[in-house]
Image (cartoon, rainbow, N blue to C red):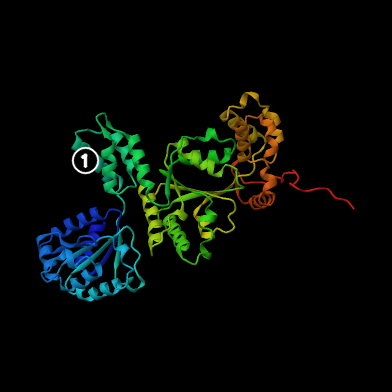
Amino acid sequence: MNLMESVKKAKLRGVPLVGISTADQLATEGQLVELFTGASGIPIMRHDVVLGARGLNDDGQVAVQRCCSGQDAALVSQSPITWLSMLLGAPEKSVCIFHNVHRWLAENGASQALQNLRDEYKANQRMVILLGPSLQLPVEIVSDVMLFAEPLPDESTVKACIQGVGEEVGVSVPDDVLSKSAGALSGLPLFAVEQSSAMSYDKAGLSIDECWRRKKSSIEQVRGLRVLDNELTFEALGGCDGIKSFLTDYQSGPAAPKLYVFVDEIEKALGGARGDTSGVSQDALGVLLSAMSDFRWSGALFVGPAGCSKSYLSQCVSGEFRVPVVQFDPGSAKGSLVGESEGLIRGCVSSILAMGGADVFWLATSNGIESLPAELQRRFCWGPFFFDLPSVAERASIWGIWLSKFGLGGVADVPALVAASEGWSGANIMNACRMAWARRKPISECLGAVIPAAVQAREQVGRLRSAATGTWFSAQTGGVYTGQAVSSLPAVGKRSLSL
C-alpha cells in the first residue's frame, strides 16, 4: 500500500490527525488534492504561516470563509494555532493541509489545539494533515497523530520525470542513457530531479556527467552527506592487497553495491552515544541500526593506527569501481531546533536508501573499536579488517607512488628509503616526500624530520595488534591476522642510565 492509499484508508476510517514526513511538501500536497478531488463533497484547505488559510477547491474556499466568519482569512488565520482553533467550525469531511509544521509544532498551545480537534474530527471524517521534512511529535500527541513517511521517488518515477522533461524540449533519450541518468539522479526529491534533468539537457541530448554534477550539488545540501567523487583508484594506494581483493570480489559478485557510504572515525561519531545526555547521538545510533537491519545493508570496519590508509582506501573505491561513494557525518547532521537533529539524521538515511536501495555497503574507519556498541559492530558483518603498519614490500610500493607523485623518483634510492622507514605508516612516507618537495631538499635529508608511527603511537599500535591477533582479518593478506612484533625502534626521549 503506497502513501496515498494509506491516507485514503485513514480518511475513510475516521482518522482525524495525520502527519507526513516528505522531502517535497508541494508535490505531496498536489497528490493529496488529486486524491480527495476524486471524491465529491470534500472541502480541501491548506495553511502556511505566510499566506494563512486558503481553499484548494470551491468547497474549500467556502469552508475557509465559514471558519473565519466572513473575515479576511489572510489577516486572521496566519497563526497556525489560531487557525487550528477556527477549524472547529469546518464542515463535515473537510481536509486541511498544514505546511512546515516542524517550525511551530513545539510551540505552546499547538498540541492542545490539535487535541481539541481529535474527537470532534473523528466523528464526521474531518482530517488535519501535517506536512514537514521530518516530524517529531510532542509527547502529548504521540498517540493522537498517525504518522506516515513519503519515500523519495523510485527509479521508474525518476525515469518518467526525466523522459517528460525531454519531451518538453523535444529531445529523445536512448534507453541506456535514460537508465544511467536515472541512476545519477536517484536519491533526490521529484522537483529536484525535474530541475536537475532540465539543466542537463542541451541540443546534443542529455548529459549524464551533468546529471552527476547536479546531483552532487543537491546531495550536499543534505546536512550530514557529502559526495566523494575523486578519480583515485587502487593503483594510488600501495599495499593493502587483502582488502583490495575482498572489495573487488564483492563488487563483481551478485550483491554488488550501487552505493558505498563512508563513515570516518565511527568511534567518535557514534561510539559515545550512551554518554550523550541530549539523546541525539542515541537517536542517530538507533536510526542507523534499524536502517541497516531493515534494508539488509552490510559493511566492513577498517581498524588500525592513524595514517595506515583506512580512509584513503575508502576514497579510492569510487574511482576504482565507478560507483558513487557518499560520506556520512552524523556530527554535522545536528541542529539547534527541537527535533531538527533527529529529522536531519532521518533525511540522510532516506537519501541513502533512495540512492542505493538495498544495495548499499558501508565502510567505517576507526582507530579503536572498544567504545563501539556490540550491536553496531554486528551490523558491519565483514571484518573487522586490521590495517597494520606497512611491511617491507608495501613500503617499497608506497615510496614508489609518492616519490613519483612529487617528482622525486629519479634521484631517490628506494631500497635505502625502505630500510630507513621501518615502523613508518603510509602517511609518514607521504609527509616525507611532501617535505622534500616543498623544501627542495633531497629526500634523505628529510627522513629525520618524521617521527615513525611505531614510535609516536607505540602503545596504540601494540594494543591494536594484540586485539587483532587471531580475531580480526588482515587488510594486507585478507586472512586472519596472525600478529607482528612491535617495532624495535627506541621511543623518542629515552636514554640508557646506570648507577
Would you place residue 429 above or below residue 498 in this image? above
Q: Amino acid at mark 1?
A: Gly
Q: Secondary structure at mark 1?
A: helix
Viewer can see residue 245: yes
Task: Left or right? Give the position of 493 relative to 80.
Answer: right
Viewer can see residue 14: no
Would you place residue 356 above or below residue 371 in this image? above
Q: Nearer the viewer, residue 108 or 45?
A: 108
Q: Residue at x 74, y 46 (%)?
A: 492
| Position of the N terminus by quadrant | bottom left
Q: Residue at x 53, y 41 (%)?
A: 312
Q: Nearer the viewer, residue 359 or 412?
A: 412
Q: Quadrant of residue 428?
A: top right
Q: Quadrant of residue 401?
A: top right
* Image position, residue 354 (x, y; %): 35, 49
Q: Quadrant of residue 158?
A: top left
Q: Which residue lies under the disc numbered 1?
A: 164
* Image position, residue 393 (x, y; %): 65, 34
* Image position, residue 90 (x, y; %): 15, 70
Q: Residue at x 33, y 35 (%)?
A: 208
Task: Left or right? Give the position of 149 relative to 11.
Answer: right
